[in-house]
Image (cartoon, grey):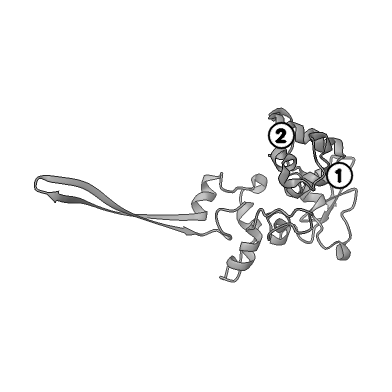
Amino acid sequence: MIKNYLLSDQWKYAGVKKIEDIKIEHLMPCLECHLPQTKFATDDVAVEIAKAAVNGDLNTLSKLSINCLVCHHDKAIIHQWVDGPPEDNVIYGNKSGKHEGVSYYSMIKKSPVLQESIFCGQCHGLGPGFHYPNPVHCAMLYGSYLNAYIPSGGTKTCQDCHMEKGHFMSAYSDSDMAKKAVRVDVETLAYYFHPKAFEWTPLAVVTVRMTCNAGHRIPDG
């Protein structure tokens, strides 16, 4: 994907002619949400990630994932002019106190947004990332939540549903969540079509009704 995305003629103004030209800024439209800690990395890391993706190096790619600090530090403060930027030695949670058993991030402070849907909206989106030179239109769940679910009388936050099982963050891959999210009603009518004497063709009419019970549209990015 990265090879086709950046090395094709379509992206001729990206300044990328070969893998070694790829910089962090080229990856951030996707990695801002999928691997946000990358913004602190050097351009050498961008080249390493790109080569792993192009070469199908699953051993390297499997090590790239969201870590605890993404939610509990980097994105735990949204209104930084009001609440200040995330502090270096602090983990943010739902309460304040000591962060036992660690020498760094030794303090816990309460995040003003950790239990609010706007916190999830930082990645699960309102629409295109127009702050990038080449905007990406990806997840729109938060927009759907704000513009459809809430006006229809919904009262739950993202966390109310997706953290019922804790940090597992249950979603479509969890069978219990899938059953709650979508109701499927099926009606069938069986009959025989009789085109001529002594010929009967079995037929059926199947009516399927799917009702979304989630706090946002399904599916989405």
* Residue at mark 1 to residue at mark 2: CA–CA distance: 20 Å
Q: Along the horizontal axis of the image, is 48 left or right of 103?
A: left
Q: Position of residue 199 (x, y in %)?
A: 13, 45
| Among the two numbered marks 1 and 2 on one chain, the one whose residue lies closer to the N terminus | 1
In this picture, residue 149 sits left or right of residue 182: right
Counting from the top left corner in percent of width and height, residue 143 is at 65, 63
Which residue is denoted by mark 1 in the rendering? Answer: 40
**Residue at (87, 54) in percent of width and height:** 86
Crowd class of label 1 (few under 14; some 14 to 19; many from 20; radius 10 Å): few
The quadrant of the rendering that contains the N terminus is top right
Residue 115 image point, x, y percent: 71, 59
Question: Residue 108 got which mark?
Answer: none
Q: Which residue is tagged 2?
A: 53
Judged from the image, the secondary structure of the residue bearing numbered disc 2 is helix
Q: Position of residue 163 (x, y in %)?
A: 64, 52
Please identify, in this view, whether the residue under mark 1 or under mark 2 is nearer the observer. Answer: 2
Residue drawn 76% across the image and 42% down it: 67
Instruction: Pick whichever, 73 or 102, lies toward us.
Output: 73
Q: 147 or 174: which is nearer to us?
A: 147
Is there CB contact under 8 Å for labels 1 and 2?
Answer: no
- The structure residue drawn at horizontal position 75% and vertical position 53%, both measured from the top left corner, is 134
Q: Relative to 207, does residue 30 appear above or below in the rendering?
A: above
The answer, for residue 174, to whether it is visible in the render is yes
**Amino acid type at image mark 1:** Phe
Dot 1 falls on a residue whose secondary structure is helix
